[in-house]
Image: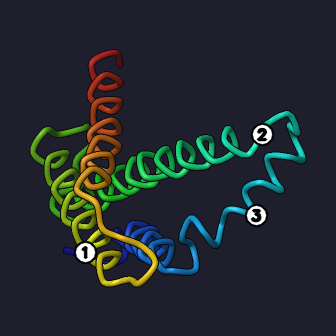
Amino acid sequence: MKLQYWKYALLWALLILFYSTDRFSSNNTDSIFATVVNFFYSGLNADQMYLFHIKFRKFMHFFNYAILSWLALFGFTLSLRPLKKWNFRVAMYAVVFCLFWAVLDETNQSFSLVRGGSLRDVGLDTVGAIFTQVVFFIRKKCV
């Protein structure tokens, strides 16, 4: 397996681990998030802002692992055997890689004093990874 094909996937995976540190806990990002949202829309009360922040954080789980799945797909596709088209087996490798990384990420968070690991987040991360592969599968069928 050639590491050069994995550099972006590994960088993204390390970025995910960095985001799972205490520095990016909900308590530490609350004020920054509120400032940015209030810049664009100042009509939210504290409860609405809190709910929006939670939903945004959950969306980022989905988004980050959708991107990681895409990068892992290319890493596997180019390093195992250069393939021209989407391949189910390789797509499953990418999803399993993302599942492994999600478990590692949530395990890392479970050792934090501020954060906690969550199986629900692992599920959401995996759904993001599967979403990317479904999009590539549909794209393959339409082309």
Mark 3 or mark 2, which has the lower sequence index?
3
Q: Amino acid at mark 3?
A: Ile
Mark 3 or mark 1, which has the lower sequence index?
3
Q: Nearer the viewer, residue 41 or 68?
A: 41
115 w.r.t. 127: above or below: below
Picture residue at 60% right of the left edge, 69% below the top? 27
Q: Percent x, y for residue 57?
A: 53, 52
Q: How is the image coloured?
A: rainbow
What secondary structure is marked by label 3?
A: helix
Nearer the observer: mark 2 or 1; the answer is 2
Does residue 80 appear left or right of residue 36 in this picture? Answer: left
Mark 2 or mark 1, which has the lower sequence index?
2
Q: CA distance from mark 3 to mark 2?
A: 16 Å
Q: CA distance from mark 2 to mark 1?
A: 34 Å
Q: Nearer the viewer, residue 130 or 2?
A: 130
Q: Percent x, y for residue 94?
A: 22, 54
Disc 2 target residue: 45
What secondary structure is marked by label 1?
A: helix
| Label 1 crowd (10 A; few <14 / some 14-19 / many >=20) | some
Q: CA distance from mark 3 to mark 1?
A: 26 Å
Q: Percent x, y for residue 45?
A: 77, 39
Q: Nearer the viewer, residue 96 or 33?
A: 33
Q: Amino acid at mark 2?
A: Asn
Disc 1 target residue: 107
Nearer the observer: mark 3 or 2; the answer is 2
132 w.r.t. 115: above or below: above
Disc 3 target residue: 32
Q: Nearer the viewer, residue 141 or 103?
A: 103
What secondary structure is marked by label 2?
A: loop
Q: Amino acid at mark 1?
A: Thr
| Label 3 crowd (10 A; few <14 / some 14-19 / many >=20) | few
Quadrant in which the N terminus appears: bottom left
